[in-house]
Amino acid sequence: MTDRYCVFGHPVGHSRSPAIHAAFAEQTGEAIDYTAIEAPLDDFAGAWRDFVAAGGRGANVTVPFKEDAYRLCDALSPRARRAGAVNTLILADDGGTRGDTTDGLGLVGDLRRHGVALAGARVLVLGAGGAVRGVLEPLLEAGPARLQIANRTAAKARALAADFADLGDVSGGGFDAVEGPFDLVINGTSASLGGELPPLPDALFAPGATAYDMMYGAEPTVFLRWAEACGARGIDGLGMLVGQAAESFYLWRGKRPDVAPVLEALRQAL
Ligand code: ATR
């Protein structure tokens, strides 16, 4: 039987993961079957159990199940433990479930592909929710000079900064506490979904700075439009999406696909 994988979400019909993994499978010659499954909101663990019983070997997990996935795992990678969330489930040989998170690797990999230097950089991260918590460890391991977290609810940013303070120079606060200039500003809030922009000073960006939005769409997000008008180079989160998928694929199959051609095809299809 072909090994089965899936993405769990709710809703999940819009997910690009099946197309991405089908492309990876073709590229690497791995025979896998990958589908999208809408799990019930009140029984994620049951959905995973049923999937395994039907030949499932692993899964991606998206909104709103990343914390549910974290809770059902028998073993967690250190970065998933720290993120408090799991985006990749792996069926272990002993039948147990391992959890990992590849979002941060996807982000850092995409920044590298774009030639954005992280070592020694001054970095601002907007937002302090699950999406930001999930990427902080790989970001800090890349060695920024400092990393400031700014959030509408300042206390959440301060608490998040304290949780990661052992990994580098991390501070947190409200948007009014933002002190630039920055070489890299990453938008991890869901604000641009609603077309809103956090209240930020115009003089945020150092010369040659990059603005990265973890969101993506057919059109540039409101955050990227604003950042580009301020003189920064804008990058959206499509490469992060494909990058995290590639890292999940590697965890399951031991082969790391080439992100670039899949990203290009996906971009054309947006
Ligand atoms: P996710 O998993 O996407 O991170 P989340 O945990 O609900 O979702 O976090 C959403 C983030 O977007 C939070 O940082 C939130 O700010 P608060 O902590 O103050 O709620 C931020 N956010 C959402 N809408 C926003 C808006 N209109 N302006 C600024 N920040 C916003």
Image: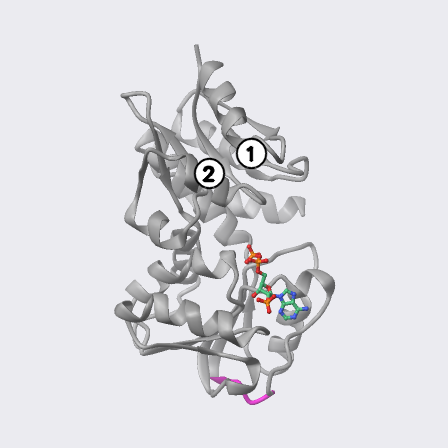
Where's residue 34, x and y in %? 52, 26
Q: Which residue is mark 2?
A: 69
Q: CA distance from mark 1 to mark 2?
A: 10 Å
Which of 256/97 is in front? 97
**Under 8 Å from ligand 1: the CB of mark 2?**
no
Where's residue 71, x and y in %? 42, 40
Which of 233/105 is in front? 105
Query: Which residue shows up at 41% across the image and 55% down it?
Result: 104
The image quadrant where one finds the N terminus is: top left
Mark 1 touches mark 2? (CB < 8 Å): yes
Q: Which mark is residue 176?
A: none
Q: Can see residue 13?
A: yes
Q: Amino acid at mark 2?
A: Ala
- Judge left or right: residue 195 versus residue 32: right
Query: Which residue shows up at 63% across the image and 31% down it?
Result: 40
Q: Which residues are magenta?
A: 202-206
Residue 91 falls in image quadrant: top left
First in sequence, mark 1 or 2: give its number. 1
Where's residue 13, x and y in %? 68, 35
Helix, strand or loop at label 2? It is helix
Q: Can see residue 260?
A: no
Q: Residues within 10 Å of mark 2 (few under 14, many from 20)?
A: many
Residue 216 falls in image quadrant: bottom right
Helix, strand or loop at label 1? It is strand
Which of 141/258 is in front? 141
Is residue 215 placed above or below 155 in the rendered structure?
above
Q: Which residue is mark 1?
A: 8
- Judge left or right: residue 14 versus residue 51: right
How many numbered marks does the figure carry?
2
